[in-house]
Image (tube, grey):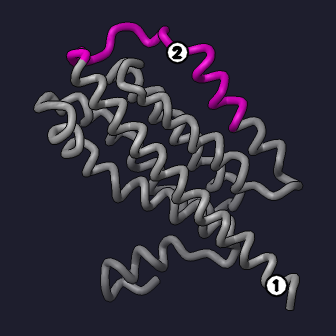
Amino acid sequence: MNFSSPWRWIKDYAAHDDPLVASANLIALVVVSNQPFYPLYLYWLVGPDIAPSCWLFLSTPFFAAVPAITRLNKTAGRALLPLAGIANTVLSAKVFGVASGVEMFLIPCVLIGFVLFRPSERLIGLVIAALAFFTFTLLHGRYGAPVHVYTPEQYASFIKLNATSVGTLTAFVGLLVMGLIGETEGRKGS
């Protein structure tokens, strides 16, 4: 790895010869790079009670470890990405409450489970997608009292924030997959 500049190091850390692994690494590092901004978004869009968002940094090391794990085991590293997302969503639902709409983050977890595994690994993706579905089905409304209760107006802002974040992440994953499909089609046409 090249340690001459932080950006080069990050690029080298995310790089991999396998395009699915490189995509998982990039998605994980995009999540890591956005996590520090979430409390700021909460402050600007929801209100000044952002202290509960500090709990969400517990997931940062797991997302940051995805590229390292993929170097040891490509399948395990790719699986870690949506599994960390599911765990982060459960933690977020407990911290903020289901009224925050944070469970929407299970949607990109399902998508990642479907698109980052090859046909020979499809069972892994299906298990991850099923885990996300059953997480919502079994836990929704059963987290107990949130760490902090927000007002109905604040929860409405929370839903907008989380819907925008989920939509952006889902679109990003979709664009990556479209690029992979385009590369594959280009190689077949050659």
Is residue 38 at all visible to an observer of this figure? yes
Is 155 left or right of 18, judged from the image as shown? left
- Residue furthest toward the bottom? 190
Q: Residue at x 59, y 64 (%)?
A: 175
Q: Quadrant of residue 4?
A: bottom left
Identify whether 1 is placed above or below 97.
below
Q: Position of residue 179 (x, y in %)?
A: 65, 72
Question: For mark 1, what is the residue?
Answer: 187
The residue shown at (70%, 36%) is 129
Q: Which residue is mark 2?
A: 140
Count of number-bearing discs: 2
The vertical placement of 124 against 99, above or below, is below
Circle 2 SS class: loop
In the rendered view, does 16 fall on the left or right side of 121?
Answer: left
* The quarter of the displayed image where residue 88 is located: top left
Residue at 67% x, 78% y: name it: 17
The magenta stretch is 129-152
Is 112 in the magenta? no
Which percent across, then down, holds residue 92? 39, 29
Q: Mark 1 is on which residue type?
A: Arg
Q: Is residue 82 positioned above or below 50 on the image?
A: below
Say which quadrant the C terminus sits in. Answer: bottom right
